[in-house]
C-alpha cells in the first residue's frame, strides 16, 4: 500500500511522525506537509507566489518527507500532482493535535488536506486526537493500523472521506459512526489596545456545542469515550431544498 500523509500542525509535529511510523508498517509512505503550523487555514491554496519544497528526514524512517511553504491543501495537491510518481492508495491527514468536531471541519486544515485527496479521486481520512497538550497516541496508532486496511479493502464511495476523532489518554469504549454536531464559538474576539493606542482584535473564544447530548453526534461520541468516525462528502448541495428553490418565482423568470 502507498500513502500520502499531510497535516496542518506542520511537518515537524509529533502527530505526523507517529502517523508515519504507524503507516510504514502497512506500506510505503510519502509525507508532504507544511513547513510550519498552518492550523485553521481551511482549504486555502497558494496562487500568487511559487511553492518551495525542502526534503528532510525523519529519524529511523524510510518515508520520503517534504516540507512545503504552503497550506495543507497545497501540500496534498503538490504531492499528488508533482512529487509522487505513483498515485497513493490513500491520503491520510493527521494526527492532529486537538479535535475536529462538528462545524470545526469547515475551518480545519487537517480536514481540508483530506478533502484535497478526494477532489483528486483518492480515498482519504483525517485523524485528530481530543487534546491540545500531553497527547497519548497509543490508541490512535492501534486504531489506524487496524482500520486503514479495512477501509481500503471495502472502499469508500467516490467523493467521501472519513473524519476520525479519538479520545486522549483513555482506552476507547469502541467506535461510533456519527454525524457532525453543531458547534459554534462564543466570545470570539478579544478587543485590545496596542502601545500606540490603536485597537486590535485577538481571535479567541470557546466552543459551544449546541447538540452535544445528542447521541448521534461526533461531539457526543468523543465526550462519552468513543472513537468517532464521520463520513464527509464533497458535494454540499442541499438536495431537499433544491426542488423547492426552483419553484420560487424569481428563479422562473425568462428574459
Image: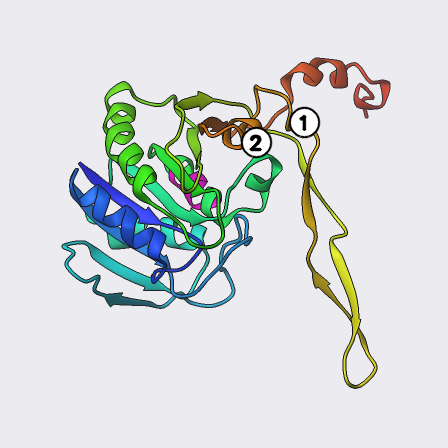
* Residue 206 lies in the magenta stretch: no
Residue 86 appears in the picture as rendered: no
Return the mark for residue 189. none
Q: Quadrant of the N terminus?
A: top left
How dense is the environment of label 2, judged by Cα within 10 Å: few (below 14), some, or many (20 and up)? many
Residue 63, by quadrant, is bottom left
Residue 128 appears in the picture as rendered: yes
> Vertically, is 228 above or below 99?
above
Q: Measuring from the top left, give residue 148's x and y in whole percent.
A: 27, 31
Residue hosting label 1: 211
Q: Which residues are magenta?
A: 112-117
Which mark is first along the chain, 2 or 1?
A: 1
Q: Quadrant of the C terminus?
A: top right
Colour option used:
rainbow
Residue occupying image coordinates x 57% and y 27%:
220
Q: Of helix, strand and loop, which mostly describes the magenta segment? A: helix
Residue 137, by quadrant, is top left
Q: Are marks 1 and 2 in contact (CB under 8 Å)?
A: yes
> Vertically, is 252 above or below 229?
above
Q: Measuring from the top left, give residue 188's x and y in whole percent.
A: 73, 53
How dense is the environment of label 1, judged by Cα within 10 Å: few (below 14), some, or many (20 and up)? some
Kindly state the secondary structure of the residue where label 1 is placed.
loop
- Along the line of sight, the residue nearer the viewer: 135 or 205: 135
Residue occupying image coordinates x 34% and y 39%:
140
**Mark 1–mark 2 distance (CA, rounded to whole Å):** 8 Å
Which residue appears farthest toward the front when viewing the image? Answer: 170
Residue hosting label 2: 219
Residue occupying image coordinates x 74% and y 17%:
246
Residue occupying image coordinates x 17% and y 45%:
24
Q: Measuring from the top left, give residue 15's x and y in whole percent.
A: 35, 52
Kindly state the secondary structure of the residue where label 2 is placed.
helix
> Vertically, is 156 above or below 63?
above
Amino acid at each position: 500500500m502507498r500513502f500520502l500523509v499531510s497535516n496542518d500542525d506542520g511537518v515537524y509535529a509529533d502527530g505526523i511522525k507517529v502517523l508515519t511510523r504507524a503507516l510504514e508498517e502497512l506500506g510505503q509512505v510519502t509525507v508532504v506537509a507544511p513547513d510550519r503550523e498552518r492550523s485553521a487555514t481551511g482549504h486555502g491554496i497558494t496562487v500568487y507566489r511559487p511553492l518551495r519544497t525542502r526534503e528532510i528526514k525523519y529519524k529511523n524512517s524510510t518515508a520520503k518527507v517534504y516540507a512545503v511553504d504552503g497550506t495543507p491543501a497545497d501540500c496534498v495537491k503538490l504531492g499528488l500532482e508533482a512529487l509522487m510518481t505513483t498515485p497513493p492508495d490513500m491520503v491520510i491527514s493527521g494526527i492532529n493535535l486537538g479535535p475536529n468536531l462538528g462545524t470545526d471541519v469547515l475551518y480545519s486544515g487537517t480536514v481540508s488536506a483530506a478533502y484535497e485527496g478526494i477532489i483528486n479521486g483518492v480515498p482519504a481520512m483525517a485523524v485528530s486526537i481530543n487534546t491540545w497538550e500531553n497527547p497519548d497516541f497509543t490508541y490512535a496508532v492501534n486504531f489506524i493500523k487496524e482500520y486503514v486496511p479495512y477501509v481500503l479493502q471495502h472502499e469508500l464511495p467516490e467523493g467521501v472521506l472519513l473524519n476520525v476523532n479519538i479520545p486522549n489518554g483513555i482506552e476507547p469504549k469502541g467506535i461510533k459512526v456519527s454525524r457532525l454536531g453543531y458547534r459554534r464559538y462564543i466570545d470570539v474576539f478579544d478587543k485590545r489596545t496596542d502601545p500606540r493606542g490603536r485597537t486590535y482584535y485577538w481571535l479567541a473564544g470557546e466552543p459551544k456545542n449546541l447538540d452535544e447530548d445528542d447521541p448521534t453526534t461526533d461531539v457526543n461520541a468523543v465526550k462519552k469515550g468513543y472513537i468517532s468516525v464521520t463520513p464527509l462528502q464533497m458535494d454540499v448541495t442541499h438536495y431537499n431544498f433544491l426542488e423547492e428553490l426552483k419553484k420560487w418565482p424569481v428563479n422562473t423568470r425568462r428574459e
